Image (tube, rainbow, N blue to C red):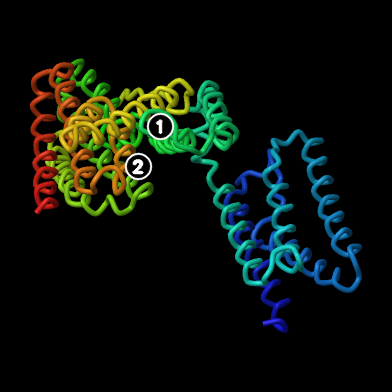
Amino acid sequence: MEPLEPFLSLAVAAAAGLLIGLEREQSAPHHQGTSSFLGGARTHPLFALVAGVAMLLERRLGWAAPVAAFAALVAFLVVNYADDVRRGADRGLTSEAAFLLSFLLGALATSRQVVEPVGQRLVVVAAVAVVATLLLSSKPVLRPFATRVSREDVTAALKFLIVSVVVLPLLPDRALGPYGALNPRSLGWMVVLISGISFVGYAAVRLVGPERGLGLTGLVGGLASSTAVTLSMAAKAREQPALAAPCALAVVAASTVMCARVAVLIGFLNGPLLGPLALPLAGMGLGGLLAWLWLRRRPTGETSGGLQIQNPFELSTAFKFGLFFAAVLVGSRFAAARLGTGGIYVTGVLAGTTDVDTIALSMAELAGTQVEWRVAATAVVLGLFSNTVVKGAMAAVLGGAAFGRTVALSFGTMMAGGLAGLLLSWL
């Protein structure tokens, strides 16, 4: 490969520049009166090739060649930017940054002793070019999202990042507390994991907006909190009884996503536990899907949502979850040591009335060591059942008779599927 290395490196450099240049040309303003166009599908790969050739020359002539090429590029960008400012053109720095990146990717493609071997270096160049093009083309998506994100959301996210990046590595990694059930590092990691997954749903709700439809709101809201979706939709169904069916659609969608969320959590933390859980989770998910399809055939009316979900990156929210998870973990250890299998099942039912994640995480932690696999899986399913019953009661009390009946029938289908899967898993 050594004789062909310069040709292959220059080809990857040109391809990276071409990818970025095509996106820049597609994003160029149609009217050039207010903004200049630096270059696109030809200029970017040319600058990438200039950088690549300059780095090849560096192997014989030293750093004068790449430094001179980079200085020429910077001079070109400065002159163009100054001219735009003089004419009062509306300019940012995205195009300039894209040019610099195309140049640097070209230089990296033919550089030596930076990323080795050659194959890995070229993969890095290609990957960076793809990510950069994605970012450049995502303006229509990122700008509406940025307008929906409040300063409080950003502050809460920064606080949480401090906890996850700075505080979490400092927590002791050893068993503490009653029954040795509490490992501070593990507790912190669980809080980070759950809050991160919840934030995906929270961000999706903020991005798509509840006006995109109650069914879609339920799907993305289920990643954050199916209970929050149930409370919000129940209130809306009471205010506007004509929307009982579409509100129930959102609730069923959120609860179905909850099953998938639990499966992902269990698979990530304790893969073998997914074996005895596969049939019950699949049964509940299938029941929810059938109910969702049934509700989709009914008239949906208007699609305004009004879903309110608290930012899961708030430290108070994360701290409360951590405390509750610690309590469930200690309770599970106590039940396993003193009360046997029945105590584990009771713990699952009680924990599920408030939060499914806590019992799922606890059983993932204990399964295969303190708790037998099928017992742990059954406790998780009982937690799902009790959570579903509580949400059904919320729907009936807060949403009115029509809404309550629709949700109860849908949840009954889910629980029947889950029960059938649980019985099969015990056979």
Amino acid at pointer 1: Tyr
Q: Determine crowd level at label 2: few under 14, some 14-19, many 20+ residues with C-alpha closer than 10 A.
A: some
Q: Is residue 35 left or right of residue 182?
A: right
Query: Foreground: 325 or 139?
Result: 325
Q: Circle 2 sits in a helix, a strand or a loop, which is it?
A: helix
Residue named by callout 2:
365
Mark in front: 1 vs 2: 2
Q: Is residue 331 left or right of residue 72?
A: left
Image point 86% across, 54% down: which residue? 71
- Residue 66 drawn at (x, y percent): 85, 62
Residue named by callout 1:
202
Q: Circle 1 sits in a helix, a strand or a loop, which is it?
A: helix
Q: Considering only vertical position in the picture, is 354 above or below 212?
A: above
Q: Considering only vertical position in the picture, is 355 above or below 3?
A: above
Q: CA distance from mark 1 to mark 2?
A: 26 Å
Image point 23% across, 31% down: which residue? 338
Q: Earlier in the sequence, mark 1 or mark 2?
A: 1
